[in-house]
């Protein structure tokens, strides 16, 4: 049967007979009061630890709110970067289509069929080369813009993913540390409770033995001696 604070509080001992040895009454009462208070404190702490280690435990307070806010911000930034990347690719595709159209128009304009027969071939070659150069320059510029946009978008996405992973990892580590700390504290409290319970039980056993010895001593005294 486990020892409770109420058991300690309600325990009572008989006073030894006159002339017999016994424990000091005030010291016994003081010790029992201390045992009662310590048992009550340890039981309360044990109940709190059990509640804190129950199902559904989560990180609480400003620290958890801050971590959740950082994760949400990183996700929003990542989504925004993906949208910008898609918009840049669409704009580059449209630009390339317009460049192809301009090149076709330039090719028609530079065609020998569109010029008078008296136009020198050298002029035709210069016009064709100029048109090709404009088209190539525009294409290179569009490709550079697209490549830069892709690099920036991918870099932003990677940074957001890395940061989100770091925040999630930090939150998991803190949660694990908190659980381990509570588990260790709970184990320490249980050891204290077991030790104190054993101490109280040992003390009670010694008191029982002392009372039994007193009774034996009383039984060994002749009745004639008690009548004096």
Image: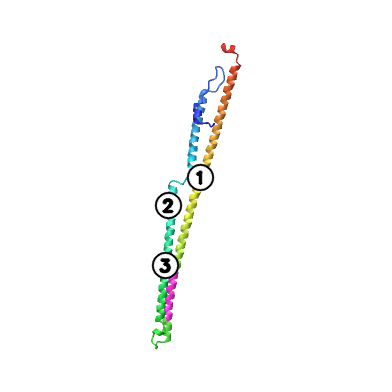
Q: Which residue is mark 2?
A: 69
Q: Earlier in the sequence, mark 2 or mark 1?
A: 2
Q: Residues within 10 Å of mark 3 (few under 14, many from 20)?
A: few
- Whether residue 33 is visible here, answered yes or no, is no
Q: Which residue is mark 3?
A: 90
Q: CA distance from mark 3 to mark 2?
A: 32 Å
Disc nearest the viewer among 3 and 2: 3
Q: Residues within 10 Å of mark 2 (few under 14, many from 20)?
A: few
Q: CA distance from mark 2 to mark 1?
A: 23 Å
Disc nearest the viewer among 1 and 3: 3
Q: CA distance from mark 1 to mark 3?
A: 50 Å
Rendered view: 148 above or below 41: below
The reply to whether the magenta stretch includes residue 130 is: yes
Q: Residue at x 44, y 53 (%)?
A: 71
Helix, strand or loop for disc 1 = helix
Nearer to me, 29 or 226: 226
Left or right: 183 in relation to 100: right
Q: Residue at x 43, y 86 (%)?
A: 121
- Whether residue 150 is visible here, answered yes or no, is yes
Q: Earlier in the sequence, mark 3 or mark 2?
A: 2
Q: Residue at x 59, y 18 (%)?
A: 217
Tally the marks: 3
Helix, strand or loop for disc 3 = helix
Give percent across and percent down for residue 201.
Answer: 56, 30
For the record, the magenta segment spans 128-144
Image quadrant holding the C terminus, namely top right
Q: Which residue is mark 1?
A: 179
Can you name the residue that lies furthest to the bottom here?
118
Helix, strand or loop for disc 2 = helix
Give percent across and percent down for residue 209.
Answer: 58, 24
Q: Residues within 10 Å of mark 1 (few under 14, many from 20)?
A: some
């Amino acid at each position: 049967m486990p020892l409770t604070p109420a058991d300690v509080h309600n325990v009572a001992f008989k006073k030894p007979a006159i002339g017999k040895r016994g424990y000091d009454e005030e010291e016994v009462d003081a010790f029992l009061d201390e045992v009662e208070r310590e048992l009550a404190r340890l039981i309360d702490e044990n109940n709190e630890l059990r509640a804190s280690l129950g199902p559904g435990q989560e990180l609480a307070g400003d620290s958890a709110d801050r971590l959740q806010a950082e994760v949400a911000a990183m996700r929003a930034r990542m989504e925004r970067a993906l949208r910008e990347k898609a918009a840049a690719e669409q704009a580059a595709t449209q630009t390339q289509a317009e460049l192809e159209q301009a090149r076709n128009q330039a090719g028609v304009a530079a065609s020998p069929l569109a010029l008078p027969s008296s136009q020198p071939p050298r002029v035709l070659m210069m016009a064709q080369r100029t048109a090709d150069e404009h088209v190539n320059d525009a294409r290179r510029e569009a490709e550079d813009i697209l490549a830069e946009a892709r690099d920036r978008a991918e870099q932003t996405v990677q940074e957001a993913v890395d940061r989100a992973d770091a925040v999630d990892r930090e939150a998991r580590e803190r949660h694990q540390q908190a659980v381990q700390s509570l588990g260790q504290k709970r184990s320490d409290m249980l050891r204290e409770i077991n030790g104190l319970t054993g101490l109280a039980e040992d003390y009670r056993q010694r008191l029982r033995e002392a009372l039994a010895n007193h009774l034996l001593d009383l039984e060994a005294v002749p009745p004639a001696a008690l009548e004096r």
